[in-house]
């Protein structure tokens, strides 16, 4: 799909559950550099499909942070909460083809089964039960794909994942695939915390007739307590100015810039990084397995 004549289409898709922190910065800067260093587009999408996790003001704060970082995006920002009709239409296609099936299980029942949905409703609802949610029927065979930084991956997401939740919200899993497909995204560069979703997202792409994009999963940044930084758990936004934030993100990707870059502005860091990549430097050496 990608060639010299078809530059990549990349994207950054934050959930507005808080401002960007050191971990989400790596995904923002990494996806930007990957697409822009090959003269591609970089799209921006607010993944606010899960209304319960949205924090007021977070989307604006993220846009301000990206502007301060000199990360310019193409076109309007796509906002998922305005696109329910598209997700509904995609679910309709999956229902018709049998990829989506209704599920009656409650959270308590899944908890009692060890916390992983055991496939109770895969072959039909148990007698007397009504549908609460819709799930994706995953293939038996594990999915295998080449990750740009992690090498060959094989995996299957726990049990069949939810597409439409019992509370009426569409799942991130579905909305993300529909939007990546609709926006013509050709490469998905994001944190490795999202790696467990990739097999189901690849299944969904096939089921909905979208081409499969290239994937590259970047390192996950851990907090001092050894746990992943997350916006919703209130991880601190980056320290200092936007130039320092660039320096931090590149250090997290294993770069060792020359001392002359000390104190550079965000724009100078961006142009430096783009020039390095265009001369063949790797965004991240990766962890090929
Ligand atoms: N919205 C997701 C998050 O902020 C990222 C989705 C993606 O990059 O695929 O964790």
Image (cartoon, rainbow, N blue to C red):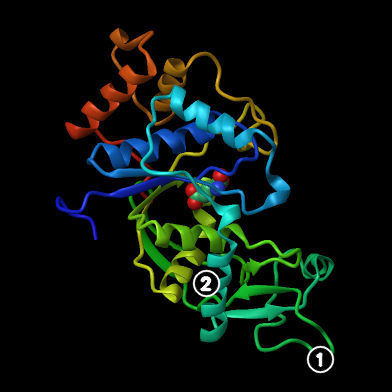
State the residue at coordinates (31%, 17%).
268
Question: Compared with residue 272, is residue 280 higher up or lower down, i.e. above or below?
Answer: below
Question: Compared with residue 91, is residue 252 higher up or lower down, i.e. above or below?
Answer: above
Question: Compared with residue 3, is residue 269 higher up or lower down, i.e. above or below?
Answer: above
Picture disc at residue 197:
none
Report, in whole angstroms, how far the alpha carbon at label 2 lies from the one at label 1.
Answer: 28 Å
State the residue at coordinates (56%, 78%).
92
Who is closer to the viewer here, 121 or 69? 69
Residue 58 lies, in percent from the top left, at 63, 34
**The quarter of the displayed image where residue 146 is located:** bottom left
Q: Which residue is label 1 attached to?
A: 127
Q: Is residue 198 visible?
A: no
Residue 19 lies, in percent from the top left, at 60, 31
**The quarter of the displayed image where residue 17 is located:** top right
Residue 86 lies, in percent from the top left, at 53, 66
- In the rendered structure, which disc, 2 or 1, sits on the residue that comes first in sequence? 2
Q: Are marks 2 and 1 in contact (CB under 8 Å)?
A: no
Q: Which residue is label 2 attached to?
A: 90
Residue 30 lies, in percent from the top left, at 38, 37
Please tell me whether mark 1 sits on a helix, a strand or a loop: loop
Q: Residue furthest bottom?
A: 127
Number of marks in picture:
2
State the residue at coordinates (47%, 77%).
141
Please tell me whether mark 2 sits on a helix, a strand or a loop: helix
Q: In what quadrant of the picture does the N terminus appear?
A: bottom left
Q: Is residue 53 visible?
A: yes
State the residue at coordinates (77%, 78%).
104
């Amino acid at each position: 799909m990608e060639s010299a004549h078809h530059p990549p289409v990349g994207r950054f898709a934050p959930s507005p559950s808080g401002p960007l922190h050191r971990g989400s910065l790596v995904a923002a800067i990494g996806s930007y550099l990957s697409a822009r260093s090959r003269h591609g587009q970089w799209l921006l999408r607010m993944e606010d499909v899960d209304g319960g996790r949205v924090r007021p003001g977070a989307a604006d704060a993220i846009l301000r942070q990206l502007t301060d970082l000199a990360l310019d995006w193409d076109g309007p920002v796509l906002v998922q909460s305005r696109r329910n009709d598209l997700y509904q239409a995609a679910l309709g296609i999956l229902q018709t083809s049998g990829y989506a099936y209704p599920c009656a299980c409650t959270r308590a029942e899944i908890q009692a089964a060890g916390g992983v949905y055991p496939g109770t409703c895969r072959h039909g609802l148990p007698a007397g039960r009504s549908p609460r949610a819709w799930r994706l029927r995953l293939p038996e065979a594990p999915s295998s794909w080449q990750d740009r930084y992690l090498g060959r991956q094989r995996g299957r997401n726990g049990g069949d994942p939810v597409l439409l939740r019992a509370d009426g919200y569409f799942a991130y899993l579905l909305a993300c695939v529909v939007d990546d497909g609709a926006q013509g995204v050709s490469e998905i560069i994001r944190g490795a915390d999202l790696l467990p979703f990739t097999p189901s997202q690849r299944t969904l792409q096939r089921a909905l007739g979208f081409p499969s994009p290239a994937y590259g999963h970047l390192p996950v940044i851990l907090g001092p307590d050894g746990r992943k930084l997350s916006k919703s758990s209130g991880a601190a936004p980056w320290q200092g100015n936007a130039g320092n934030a660039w320096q931090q993100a590149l250090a997290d990707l294993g770069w060792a810039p020359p001392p002359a870059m000390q104190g550079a502005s965000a724009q100078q860091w961006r142009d430096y990084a783009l020039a390095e990549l265009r001369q063949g430097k790797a965004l991240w050496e990766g962890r090929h397995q």
